[in-house]
Image (tube, coloured by chain):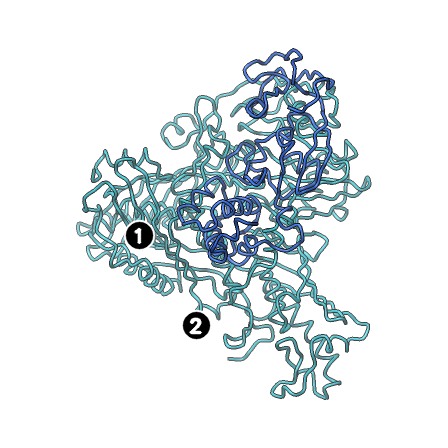
Amino acid sequence: MRRKKDRPRETNPDKTALTRRDFLKGAGVTVSGGLLVGSKAADAAPAPPEAGVVGPGAVPVTLRVNGKVHKLKLEPRVTLLDALREHLDITGSKEVCDRAVCGSCTVMMDRKPVYACTVLALEAEGHEVTTIEGLAADGKLTPVMAAFVRHDAQQCGFCTPGFVMACTALLERNPDPSLEEIEKGLGGNLCRCGTYWGIRHAVLDVAKGMKGGAYGKV
Amino acid sequence: MAKCKYDWPQAGERELIGKRIDRIDGPEKASGRAKYTYDTNRPGMLRAKLLTCPYAHAKIKSIDLSSAQNLPGVKATLVIQGPGSEIQWAGDEIAAVAAVSDDIAEDACRRIQVEYEQLPHLVREEDLDRAQAQGRTKAGGEETTGDPGKAFQDPEAVISKGYYGIPVITHCCLESHGNVAEWPDAKTLKTWSSTQNVSGLPGQFGAGLRLQKVEVDDSNIETVCQYIGGGFGSKFSPDRWGIVVAQLSKLAGKPVQLMLERNIELEMAGARPSAYAKIRVAAKKDGTLTAWDSESWGTGGVGPAGHPPLPYVLQPPNTHWKHTMIAANVGPARAWRAPNHPQACLLTLGALDDLAAKLEMDPVEFLMKNAHLAPQGLGQVYTEELQKAAELAEWKKNWHPRGDKTPGHIKRGMGVSLHTWGGRGHTSSCNVIVRPDGSVTVRLGSQDLGTGTRTVIAISVAETLGLPVEAVKVEIGDSKYPPDGASGGSTTVGGVSSSTRRGAIDALDELFAAVAPSLGVQPAQLEAWNGRIRVKGDSSKSLTWKQACAKLGVKTITTTGKNPGPCHLNDSGVGGVQIADVSVDTETGQVKVNRIVAAQDCGLVIDLKTAESQVYGALIMGICYSLFEEKVMDETLGRMLNPNMEFYKLAGIGDIGELIVHMMTGPGYDERGVIGLGEPPVISPGAAIANAVANAIGVRVSTLPLTPDKVLAALDKGGLA
């Protein structure tokens, strides 16, 4: 890890109670880099200082989002989603289930789709984060977005950015998916208004227009 | 037929109405630029969280916020229900904290010490006798028509008895309920609210705040909602948490956002009442329906929740129904898309399907035979829709009598249902503004729930002015605009299309008056067509829209259009028929929807594309509640066991099968004017799918959702397996 080890640490009396949210966030960090937030998931007592441990107070975090570098000071428990939405005002990714079920928060890390509600901002350091705002940076709709409009693959629109991200990632991996591959590839996203019919057709339409794999070269 | 001034154009004269037109806010949504209440980031904004009650029934003995208040970053706290308050459901609000971040607000809520005295609760209502024994029941109405006692005793009568039910489900809006509140000065409140009721919210905020001794005039409150992430009937009021966030904002002197956490959203911010019933139905041997008798019960929380309209749609000459309301300690009911209809539909059309099976009749023929028992005027609609749906579903080819006799463990079945809804346009007012530069704006305090309201408004005005859709700027979602009704009960499209039609016709009148002298004709000789103002019958005499508007000089036209108003522009009362085709795996109990066909009328369709989307969406929502959704309550804990989206299941993109939507349009439908469409198509899927499952496996699965355990249990009791 390239994190400085001599970062000042603060103690937080609230870390004595472990919630589902804390658990997810702690577990997420452990998996990715061996960092611990405040305490180990299985141990509610305040952790002694350890090499490589940061927080629980705010620490500097550098995020690269849609090609732009942002230097932030965040508590280590802050998710990538909250960092984007609340600290950077990049609000296209939505918070819905807040536990990696519905896909409304989908962003790409190094062009791979991830649930931003279950990635810590710290974990996103060193990666290129792309949000829906980064797909249409020039203000023009991407082929997927245009197909969503054409096939009316959206109603209230709250799940739409997540679906657009998931569809884009799917088509980048597999420019000519079958219906089964679409259903599997988009199985991690949920909609309440019932826009799946339009989404299915939007993806098939884009794939048809992109035969030959042009989408994979985006 | 004498033409009334504001009438919709005749079929041959429509340039836009009834075509498939892209929703005008589609690009904003698809690109992630659309800003919802949840996305509102005001300068210096605090985030608030609620502390909610963990018990289904309890009294608050004491509450101590001091530790929460001492936490750095906490800017305001509020006791919502203090000592002595009796809490009637788990998830009810106790206290709130506003802090500099979500996480700190959550930390602070955890520090609040509340002492409760637990009281006895009841949270499961399917067992009526148990609820009665606990004194939790209340009469919910009873009615008799004709002589059902005699009709059931008729020795010629074929009688079917059954038990049917549909549990409490939630709204599960993807954008949870919530608001941002900001006081620009001590007397003025601005809210960004996730609401179906933009024009109505300021008055409700004002009343709620004054009850809490916060003085504010309704006229100094503005509510904004440009985009809303789902409502489905659950977002008509600011709710207590809305008043709370305005109080917190006042206390902290900063803007505050409070959006419900997902678990709270599912526990208490939306529920559809349950309905269970023991039903008897009778018919003559030829299938003519003669009698109905039902004893039903259900819960809408601790308060009353009305009763499902039984029997639904088809009214035999002899009926008796009796309903019992159960006061259960669960989050209170809210209007859920077509209130009480999906329940009534499942109970009735399920019972009728079982009767048809007993009569050994094809259920489509059975419904055709009894369509005359539908309310006035709808019989013919149902007959046409049954024919159309049966044709699209290849009913004759695919239907078989109860129980798929083909070998193997995958059994296929077909089921049919029908439904009705009102949907008359609500009270609406708008301003139509035409400026000398040719720009056109239409403004009203409406809201677009994703149904396509913006697009319908643009089409109505553009069609009237002879302009393309893009030429009309639609401004909605702000209570400062002319008031428009709440979006509930499928009333919006009728209301806004009518008010904007009238406003646009009046604007055109003013424009014709300004233009007529330069074309040397009377205003009445002019018409708007294809981006021009021209003399009727002499297209050589015309001006472009811009040239015409330039004749206004410095005058801007501003008209007010209203609904209700002159001429017949909207109506009420639709039918709708759906046919489901399912496969059931008798080894796993899993139900798979192969296809659903919907034939739906809604009078004059304004935008065929968004209208069809309403039906596709309703079918998918119907699959959700037929196969997956249930608010699972635990009697011991008194709590909902699945207040999250991994166990409160919604259908995914792989669960929907093939959907076929047919809108009934043309002569007989169009001249009725505009009728709302949001509710009706969500009513039938439960009955159609449940009937299809019964047709596949030869036995009824009594209650929704049709989960594998229930399917296997039904098979054990006497199905095909």
Secondary structure under tag 2 reads loop
Total labels: the figure holds 2
The residue tagged with tag 1: helix, strand or loop?
strand
Up the image or down, B519 lies above or below A39; here it is below
Around disc 1, counting alpha carbons within 10 Å, would you say few (fewer than 14), some (14 to 19), or many (20 or more)?
many
- Horizontal and vertical percent for residue B215? 77, 39
Closer to the eye: label 1 or 2? 2
**Nearer the observer, B110 or B564:** B110
Q: Are marks 1 and 2 on the same chain?
A: yes
Q: Quadrant of residue B72?
A: top right
Pick the quarter of the image with the N terminus of chain A.
top right
Q: Colour of chain B?
A: cyan
Task: Identify the residue shown where x is 60% and y is 35%.
Answer: B260
Residue assigned mark 2? B667
Given residues B185 and B323, the one toward you in this image is B185
Q: Residue at x 56, y 40 (%)?
A: A106
User: Hey, what amino acid is under mark 1?
Assistant: Asn
Q: Output the letter for the chain in blue.
A: A
Q: Which mark is residue B318?
A: 1
Kindly check if marks 1 and 2 are in contact, taking CB atoms under 8 A apart as contact. no
